[in-house]
Image: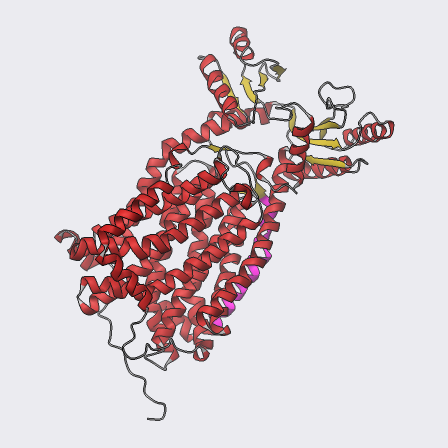
């Protein structure tokens, strides 16, 4: 297959480039339409009680979603301001799709005790389609913002999701503007030439276009989270640069032994292309674990990110070879080491040191990684609120204003209890008694909605405990609980139930792929153990920073007491795949050296010396991409960005440079061992490389 791809790309390079050019136009044209389809309904899990109750309310409740306006910065008793607010309330009531707008001057609790702020809640009609709801939201919010006061903010409900989508789009643009020039500068340093440096960026842009197009296509059949844009774009950009870097380094090496550019491209695809193929497959397999979860968010993220990985892989195996055929003749070959000088001598020295001091290396690195991982057992997740957004966002300013002027709990979503027809009065009374000030609203058909407010955040410990108490008190009555806290409880239960199966699916797939790549049983197991160590260390730091609040201010964030429920599963899935990426880079070179020399110990040194530079550069470039996405200030993306940055850097340095040679030296020749039946199966069905040819000397032209 790789040979066929290489020959197609070299025979018709202009056709391949034209097809990819059309793909880019499609991605940046049609694909960017996904920004208008983003959803913030992350915690929804089909089949759960909270989702069932929410669907019932959508059908039966005549009242729809709501948004909130807040007016502050001046005494609300001012006659001019009161007239402004009353005119705005009257105008909003006339907006098509608006069900109710209470007058804040006569409604209890709408005016702050200090007299310097008031709240304007707007309830929409139920049953509005997406377009009608968006028109209603825009008209109502715009009219409230016209109130002449120092601070006027509107957010909440579906408007919060739209604001997050706009923030996601802006953050992606800013991250690309920051990361692409920095990546180009680093590539110039690595390759020393503009042509070589630009080619990975061409592949990277293809990856970004693929991210947009994949998300747009998935949005036709499922909801796409506001977090999906940043995550898929950062990964698509980073992996594209990784794969292109690996291919270009190998191409320049092949150019040392042949002047025929087409032949150099064929040999590059045959060697490095195999690594790219298996790397893409391992990253995609790592993401299949997300498909085990019934959460629409996790499944859509797994599918979208896996699609982007495949697009990056195909671009590296088709577009890049075509570009090399057209422009590779102007790319200088890699420098030949001087007489007696060892190629990659720094990494060779590190490998020899780790191999000689294997016990000491393990005794130091493993405890350090375990210490960094200590916060992980205390990790907590939450849905989060507007505090996750930067301080300059309207939703965050609204929440901060309400918190500054109103009692705690004002504006916080209540625990919503749906009492379906047939619920007895005694059960309803017991539920209402769980929270002071519980309100009841009758529904058509004989049902009722009981809203109970708890102190603290909508998804805090008190709210989730209240959900559990309601579910205990209801007995066998047809009562269901929904709302933010109930969705969080159901999401946590879903994670706890499906996480072991997700882990088993990923580990089984990774072990099979690594066995097919190496023919060893022990190498996949060693790889999984060392990767989990680096992953736990990175996740521990994220908990320490964003949950506990240590040094969070340096990143423009704050300790929220819990991580976003989106962060841990995505960090684990993506970082695990990226770790396999670098593992394959190194194992491919080690295997080549072992096939050539037959010396297991020297193969470790040679493999690391020839791949260490690529892995280090790739990790640095990927870290730059992840760091650029951390400039937006959106807390969930900050968490994912920091987790992936640390996971990549720890894995590419501590694990691949120290733990890999130390454990390989400890295993010795047994590292490549497999039982005889499996060895025979690998010889028949596995991926086997031919014995590498000896380097061919250049023949001067004209001879």
What x and y, as percent, mark residue 246? 38, 65
Most extreme residue toward the bottom, as rendered? Answer: 703
Query: Residue 535 appears in which quarter of the rendering?
Result: top left
What x and y, as percent, mark residue 10? 41, 74
Question: What residue is shown at x 56% (from left), y 24% (from top)?
Answer: 456
What x and y, as percent, mark residue 168? 59, 47
Which coloring applies here? secondary structure
State whether the magenta stretch is mostly helix, strand or loop.
helix
Most extreme residue toward the top, as rendered? Answer: 426
Work out whether residue 549 or residue 626 is closer to the camera in this orientation and state it.
549
Q: Is residue 123 visible?
A: no
Q: Quadrant of the C terminus?
A: bottom left
Q: Which residues are magenta?
A: 14-37
Query: Residue 86 appears in which quarter of the rendering?
Result: top right
Count of picture labels: 0
What x and y, as percent, mark residue 200? 47, 66
Q: Quadrant of the N terminus?
A: bottom left
Whether residue 521 appears in magenta in the rendering, the answer is no
Work out whether residue 102 or residue 34 is closer to the camera in this orientation and state it.
102
Instruction: Indicate left or right for 300 with 653 as reference.
Output: right
Query: Residue 503 appears in which quarter of the rendering?
Result: top left
Work out whether residue 357 or residue 470 is closer to the camera in this orientation and state it.
357
Q: Is residue 314 visible?
A: yes
Question: What residue is shown at x 74% (from left), y 26% (from top)?
Answer: 101
Q: Where is 460 relative to 230, above or below?
A: above
Question: What residue is shown at x 45% (from left), y 32% (from top)?
Answer: 380
Whether residue 19 appears in magenta in the rendering, the answer is yes
Q: Where is 15 relative to 500, above or below?
A: below
């Amino acid at each position: 297959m790789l040979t066929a791809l290489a020959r197609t790309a070299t025979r018709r390079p202009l056709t391949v480039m034209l097809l990819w050019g059309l793909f880019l136009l499609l991605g940046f044209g049609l694909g960017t339409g996904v920004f208008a389809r983003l959803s913030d309904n992350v915690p929804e899990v089909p089949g759960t009680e909270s989702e069932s109750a929410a669907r019932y309310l959508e059908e039966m409740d005549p009242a729809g979603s709501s948004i909130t306006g807040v007016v502050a910065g001046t005494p609300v008793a001012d006659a001019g301001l009161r007239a402004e607010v009353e005119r705005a309330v009257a105008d909003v009531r006339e907006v098509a799709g608006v069900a109710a707008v209470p007058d804040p001057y006569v409604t209890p609790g709408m005016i702050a005790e200090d007299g310097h702020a008031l709240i304007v809640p707007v309830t929409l009609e139920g049953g509005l389609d997406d377009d009608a709801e968006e028109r209603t939201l825009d008209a109502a919010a715009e009219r409230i913002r016209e109130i002449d006061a120092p601070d006027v903010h509107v957010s909440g409900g579906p408007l919060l999701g739209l604001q997050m989508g706009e923030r996601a789009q802006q953050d992606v643009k800013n991250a690309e503007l920051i990361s692409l020039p920095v990546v180009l500068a680093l590539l110039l340093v690595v390759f020393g030439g503009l042509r070589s440096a630009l080619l990975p960026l061409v592949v990277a842009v293809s990856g970004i276009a693929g991210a947009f197009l994949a998300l747009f296509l998935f949005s036709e059949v499922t909801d796409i989270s506001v977090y999906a844009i940043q995550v898929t774009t950062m990964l698509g950009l980073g992996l594209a640069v990784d794969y292109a870097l690996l291919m270009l380094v190998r191409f320049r090496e092949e150019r040392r032994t042949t002047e025929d550019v087409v032949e150099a491209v064929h040999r590059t695809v045959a060697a490095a292309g195999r690594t790219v193929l298996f790397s893409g497959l391992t990253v995609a397999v790592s993401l299949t674990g997300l498909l085990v979860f019934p959460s629409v968010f996790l499944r859509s993220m797994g599918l979208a990110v896996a699609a982007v990985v495949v697009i990056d892989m195909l671009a590296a195996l088709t577009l890049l070879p075509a570009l090399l055929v057209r422009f590779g003749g102007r790319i200088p070959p890699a420098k030949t080491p001087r007489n007696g000088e060892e190629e990659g001598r720094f990494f060779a020295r590190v490998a020899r040191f780790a191999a000689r001091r294997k016990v000491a290396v393990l005794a130091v690195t493993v405890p350090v990684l375990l210490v960094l991982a200590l916060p992980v057992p205390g990790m907590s997740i939450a849905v989060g609120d507007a505090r996750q957004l930067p301080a300059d966002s309207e939703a965050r300013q609204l929440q901060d204003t309400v918190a500054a002027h109103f009692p705690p709990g004002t504006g916080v979503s209540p625990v919503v209890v749906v009492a379906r027809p047939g619920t007895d009065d005694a059960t309803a009374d017991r539920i209402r008694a769980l929270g002071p000030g519980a309100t009841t609203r009758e529904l058509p058909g004989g049902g009722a909605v009981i809203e109970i407010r708890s102190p603290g955040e909508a998804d805090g410990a008190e709210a989730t405990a209240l959900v559990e108490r309601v579910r205990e008190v209801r007995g066998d009555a047809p009562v269901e609980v929904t709302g933010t806290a109930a969705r969080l409880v159901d999401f946590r239960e879903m994670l706890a139930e499906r996480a072991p199966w997700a882990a088993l699916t990923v580990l089984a797939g990774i072990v099979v792929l690594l066995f097919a790549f190496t023919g060893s049983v022990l190498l996949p197991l060693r790889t999984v153990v060392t990767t989990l160590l680096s992953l736990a260390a990175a996740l521990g730091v994220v908990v320490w920073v964003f949950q506990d609040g240590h040094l969070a201010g340096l990143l423009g964030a704050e300790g929220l007491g819990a991580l976003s429920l989106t962060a841990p599963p995505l960090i684990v899935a993506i970082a695990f795949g990226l770790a396999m990426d670098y593992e394959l880079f190194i194992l491919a070179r080690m295997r080549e050296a072992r096939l050539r020399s037959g010396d297991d110990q020297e193969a470790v040194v040679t493999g690391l010396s020839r791949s260490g530079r690529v892995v280090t550069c790739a990790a640095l470039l990927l870290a730059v991409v992840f760091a650029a996405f951390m400039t937006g200030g959106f807390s969930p993306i900050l968490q994912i960005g920091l987790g992936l940055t640390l996971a990549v850097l720890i894995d590419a340095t501590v694990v691949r440079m120290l733990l890999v040679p130390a454990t390989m030296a400890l295993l010795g020749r047994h590292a490549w061992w497999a039982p005889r039946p499996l060895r025979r199966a690998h010889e028949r069905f596995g991926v086997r490389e031919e014995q590498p040819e000896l380097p061919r000397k250049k023949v001067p032209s004209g001879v």
